[in-house]
């Protein structure tokens, strides 16, 4: 993260495998003997004792896995502390580059920052309008309490390494290498390097860890050698790699007046919060979320975590881990629909790391086959329970939820080899629930269970969280069994398919409560916090596909009642919760309401640099909002390519290109006065095309190139 300070530049550095130590074995050895006790207590209605027994016998030891940490910082002290004019810094979401311009002492200084995925290297270029104007001292460092650290200063380089977490921990090595034109470079004291009167300076930075390489220093040297003296080609390659992803989608929501557009982004955001219309700012916000996903999740990387590669704290909020009871999944909601399917692969890779550890937890904690995991994990795939609270600790549902991403990815690209490779992962999650589910009153339910982080009130006023058969569990499992059945049929596999049908059909059904809402728990309890940030019992609406206005109108009405009750009591108060709300209302085809919440997340939960605010900063709300904007423009989860299903009268005219629908369709849409003008649909796979236009407006469908792979369809309103 570039803080862009004129006098002393600070760059916070991240390497995604730098965490607080090596793998931990945390399973509570008393879990197996505790589980039947907890179930018996829940059956007897002794909920308080069930909760305390559960935590005492099943909470992990220690209670948390590893935390994500920053690598460190590099500073450049230019000494330009006063009389700086014309200062400007930018992030160009079209090229993925960062820059700074300002004037000091009659000289224009320019800094350029590039992160290259192909090279695995950061490149900085410092230039000036007058020769011999660039002088600075540079230092590379890390909090010295965070690991066993070494620092070396060479003639043209700074090196830093550390072993984090002691024996068996993570060893990393990093090097900043300097190339200068004109001037001199020399080691300063024991920690910095000094450049004097240079015309131009190139700084290369690379870092690797023992998570991926036995000798990280060797890989760092290899990466730096490959780019040395090649800044222009490095820059060209980095931008081309980024743009091949980012330029797939464009969004036009209308034109912002030049007087507003010329303002700095933070000022534009302030004026937007004050009520000034700025459609181009919303389009930028959408693209910023896509930029963040490209920046933090690429082939070979770890997935996007809670604060992502922008974390600068050694003890970050919630450990900046992979929080897999909503937040990590939300990070990937825009991956498929906004044409960034490649960014999904790190999540699939992490699931394969989790699976063997989840098998040990499944057997050791629950005496179940298959695999499971709880509500947080780390780079080592930790699958044990996390933290200590009845509302979140024993929640063995994340393997099931994560598995839905596998079949969702398949729905968009129909890659059977991918599906065949990943079917054992889905099957493993299914097998766990064959064993974990118990039958009560003729239905299969989870026990113990919880609706993530929420608390209910018993008729006697007692507040509890642990339960039997929370609604979210049933919705996730209905999706899991459906995905497994469909995947098996596609691949011609028959193992366990009939058993999965039986379990699917006997899951506890949804229920409508006293307020017309979908019940969050098996009983129609009062919520301790009716405006709670988690709306877990609407998983079936989004990201699931079990509730839609067109196919299940009764349940869609109940879902809306659920949302209205949440919002009336202060719901959607956090950034990521507001993002989820956008997607909910988009799926309900309530365009004005969805776009109200898009505007609200920008007004109430967005920092001046466009990062999402929980508070504190979390990246998930950015990703979730980009997905939500896409959902208002295109939906395909209900078996049809639905054009502009949830647009707003405030953005009644516009266009979008490059969104992707399930079945392998790339969709461009133009609308005016909330009516379709034209849509172009390109068929990647040659599947049959079913189209719906907003409000069931009649349309004509014309095809170029037949109806097979490569066909281009034009959708026009009927005359």
Image: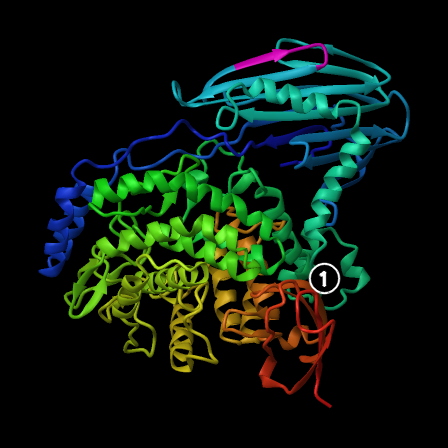
Q: In this view, does 265 lie above or below 302?
A: below
Q: Residue at x 59, y 49 (%)?
A: 342
Which span of residues is magenta-colored?
150-156
Residue 365 position (above or below residue 43): above
| Image coords of residue 616 (percent x, y) | 49, 46
Q: Where is residue 499 in the image (x, y as percent from the top left)?
A: 27, 62
Quarter where residue 716 is shown:
bottom right
Residue 163 image point, x, y percent: 46, 19
Q: Is residue 517 visible?
A: yes
* Placement of 323 over or under 705, stated as above or below: above
Query: Which residue lies at the image location 18% right of the left edge and 47% below the top edge?
Result: 54
Q: Where is residue 81 in the image (x, y as percent from the top left)?
A: 74, 28
Per the image, is 523 magenta?
A: no
* Image quadrant containing the C terminus: bottom right
Left or right, 338 with respect to 468, comes to: right
List the residue tagged with mark 1.
280
Classify 707 as above or below 225.
below
Which of the two residues, 519 or 484, is positioned nearer the viewer here?
484
Which quadrant does the N terminus fall into? Answer: top right
């Amino acid at each position: 993260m570039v803080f862009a300070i004129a006098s002393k530049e600070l760059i916070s550095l991240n390497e995604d495998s730098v965490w607080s130590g090596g793998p931990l074995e945390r399973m509570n050895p008393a879990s197996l003997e505790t589980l039947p006790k907890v179930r018996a207590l829940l059956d007897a209605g002794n909920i308080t004792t069930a909760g305390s027994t559960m935590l005492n016998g099943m909470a992990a030891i220690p209670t948390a896995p590893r935390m994500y940490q920053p690598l460190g910082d590099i500073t450049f002290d230019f000494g330009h502390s006063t009389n700086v004019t014309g200062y400007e810094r930018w992030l160009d979401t079209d090229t993925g580059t960062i820059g700074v311009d300002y004037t000091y002492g009659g000289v224009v200084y320019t800094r350029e920052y590039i992160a290259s995925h192909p090279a695995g290297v950061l490149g900085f270029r410092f230039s000036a309008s007058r020769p011999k104007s660039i002088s600075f001292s540079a230092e590379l460092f890390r909090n010295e309490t965070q690991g066993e650290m070494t620092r070396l200063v060479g003639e043209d380089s700074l090196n830093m390494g550390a072993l984090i977490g002691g024996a068996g921990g993570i060893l990393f090595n990093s090097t900043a290498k300097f190339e200068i034109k004109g001037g001199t470079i020399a080691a300063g004291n024991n920690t910095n390097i000094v450049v004097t009167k240079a015309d131009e300076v190139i700084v290369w930075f690379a870092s690797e860890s023992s998570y991926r390489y036995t000798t990280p220093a060797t890989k760092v040297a290899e990466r730096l050698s490959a780019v040395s003296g090649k800044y222009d080609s490095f820059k060209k390659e980095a931008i081309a790699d980024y743009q091949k992803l980012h330029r797939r989608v464009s969004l036009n929501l209308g034109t912002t007046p030049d007087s507003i557009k010329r303002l700095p982004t933070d000022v534009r955001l302030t004026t937007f919060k004050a009520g000034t219309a700025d459609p181009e700012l919303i389009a930028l916000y959408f693209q910023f979320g896509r930029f963040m996903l490209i920046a933090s999740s690429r082939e070979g990387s770890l997935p996007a975590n809670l604060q992502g590669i922008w974390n600068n704290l050694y003890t970050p909020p919630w450990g900046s881990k992979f929080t897999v009871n909503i937040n990590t999944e939300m990070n990937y909601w825009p991956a498929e629909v906004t044409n960034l399917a490649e960014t999904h692969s790190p999540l699939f890779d992490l699931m394969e790391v989790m699976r063997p550890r989840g098998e040990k937890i499944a057997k050791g904690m629950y005496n179940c086959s298959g695999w499971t995991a709880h509500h947080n994990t780390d780079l080592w795939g930790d699958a044990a329970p996390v933290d200590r609270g009845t509302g979140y600790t024993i929640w063995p549902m994340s393997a099931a939820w994560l598995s839905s991403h596998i079949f969702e990815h398949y729905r968009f690209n129909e890659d059977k080899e991918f599906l065949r490779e990943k079917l054992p992962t889905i099957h493993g999650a299914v097998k766990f629930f064959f064993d974990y589910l118990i039958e009560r009153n003729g239905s299969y339910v989870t026990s113990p269970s919880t609706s993530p982080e929420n608390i209910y009130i018993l008729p006697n006023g007692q507040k509890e969280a642990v339960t039997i058969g929370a609604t979210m569990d049933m919705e996730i499992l209905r999706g899991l069994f459906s995905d497994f059945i469909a995947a098996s049929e596609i691949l011609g596999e028959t193992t366990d398919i009939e058993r999965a049908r039986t379990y699917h059909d006997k899951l506890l059904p949804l229920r409508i409560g006293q307020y017309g809402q979908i019940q969050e728990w098996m009983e129609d309890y009062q919520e301790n916090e009716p405006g709670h940030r988690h709306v877990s019992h609407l998983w079936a609406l989004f990201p699931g596909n079990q509730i839609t206005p067109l196919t299940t109108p009764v349940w869609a009405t109940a879902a809306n009642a659920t949302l209205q009750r949440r919002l009336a009591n202060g719901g959607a108060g956090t950034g990521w919760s507001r993002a989820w709300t956008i997607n909910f209302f988009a799926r309900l085809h309530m365009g004005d309401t969805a776009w109200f919440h898009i505007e609200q997340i920008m007004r109430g939960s967005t920092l001046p640099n466009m990062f999402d605010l929980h508070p504190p900063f979390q990246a998930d709300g950015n990703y979730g909002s980009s997905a939500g904007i896409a959902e208002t423009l295109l939906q395909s989860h209900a078996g049809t390519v639905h054009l502009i299903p949830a647009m707003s009268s405030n953005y009644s005219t516009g266009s979008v290109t490059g969104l992707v629908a399930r079945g392998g369709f790339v969709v461009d849409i133009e609308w005016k006065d909330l009516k379709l003008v034209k849509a172009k649909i390109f068929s990647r796979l040659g599947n049959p095309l079913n189209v719906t236009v907003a409000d069931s407006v009649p349309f004509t469908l014309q095809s170029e190139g037949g109806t097979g792979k490569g066909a281009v369809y034009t959708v026009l309103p009927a005359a």
